[in-house]
Amino acid sequence: MSPGTRLLYLLTPPALLTYTVHRGLTHLEAKYPAVPPEQASSRALTTPENPATQRCAEIDIYQARVPVEGLLRAAAAAAAAATNNNPNTSNTNLSPTINTQTLQTAWAILFLTSPIIQTEAKLIGLLTTGKFHPGDVGLSPAGFQPPEPSPDNPAPTKRKLINGGFIVERQPTESPYGLLASWKIPNEPREFFERIAQWGYPWRLMSGGRHEWSVSEPYLVDESEGAADGTKEREWVVDVRFASAHDYEVVEAEGERQKVIPGWGGRLHRGFAMLLVEDTVRRVK
């Protein structure tokens, strides 16, 4: 085998993988254009944890339209399936009354019980507790409320979701903004990249960030397919949104050109967020 042929064999698989990922990302980007933060996010999402030393460098919001009936039905089915798999989660937390809080809770539960998030949660559980279990996804009787103080831990605490991967900062409420959860990058890898960035490395890791799951007010639309008599049927729908915000430490030596993750890494992260929305919405429709 000539050296040129061997090189071709070596380069073909990564080239095909890169092309496939690029095509997949392009499809998702066309299907889920980013929503401007000023149109669909809360101040709590866009404000860094420590504004004195951090900046919110990137905010990404993606949305899709789903039928109200389908959202509630899919969330109830997901909650029932999770409850059957875990006897400790005996409450679906889905009120029979259709209001903003019900829709916000339904969207959050449906998202957190998606196969991708469940797999991620189980891996976190395996690493942190030694158990391949997704942990809390808002299906306990307390829902997303803070845990009750106990004799061993009398101080107020925030509820942890997916084995501590997310920390609940705001419960689904009667507002346009829904559930808000924060997450953090461990200090060790962040500080490592900050050190090598001082020596000329072009990128840094974020410190952490927040996710927001919001639902619009219901509105009526004409269905794409008419009824048998030729008239158009109408149904109630909502826009469901998933938002991400990334916090970075402010480094004075970097001036106005603060370093962040590389562009390709940011695109992959945004693509993963779109994939999560796609995966969750597919379960509604």
Image (cartoon, grey):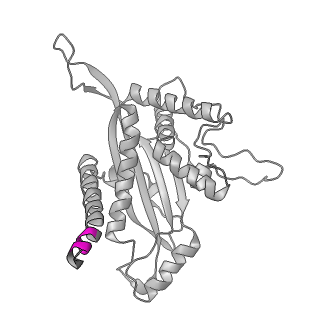
What residue lies at 42% left-to-right and 31% top-to-bottom?
A: 71
Q: Is residue 210 visible?
A: yes
Q: Quadrant of residue 284?
A: top left
What residue lies at 65% left-to-right and 58% top-to-bottom?
A: 128
Direction left: furthest residue: 230
Eyeballing the image, is 58 above or below 63? below
Question: Dividing the image into 4 quarters, which one contains the C terminus?
Answer: top left
Question: Dividing the image into 4 quarters, which one contains the N terminus?
Answer: bottom left
Q: Position of residue 41 (x, y in %)?
A: 40, 51
Q: Depth check: give the residue in front, 203 or 210.
A: 203
Eyeballing the image, is 85 above or below 150? above
Prevailing secondary structure class for the magenta stretch in the rendered image: helix
Eyeballing the image, is 45 above or below 236? below
Q: Position of residue 165 (x, y in %)?
A: 57, 55
Residue 64 colored in magenta in the image: no
Q: Depth check: give the residue in front, 208 or 215.
A: 208
Q: Depth check: give the residue in front, 269 or 232.
A: 269
Residue 8 colored in magenta in the image: yes
Q: Is residue 24 left or right of residue 142?
A: left
Q: Quadrant of residue 256?
A: bottom left
Q: Depth check: give the residue in front, 263 or 9.
A: 9
What residue range appears in magenta?
A: 5-9
Q: Position of residue 146 (x, y in %)?
A: 66, 46
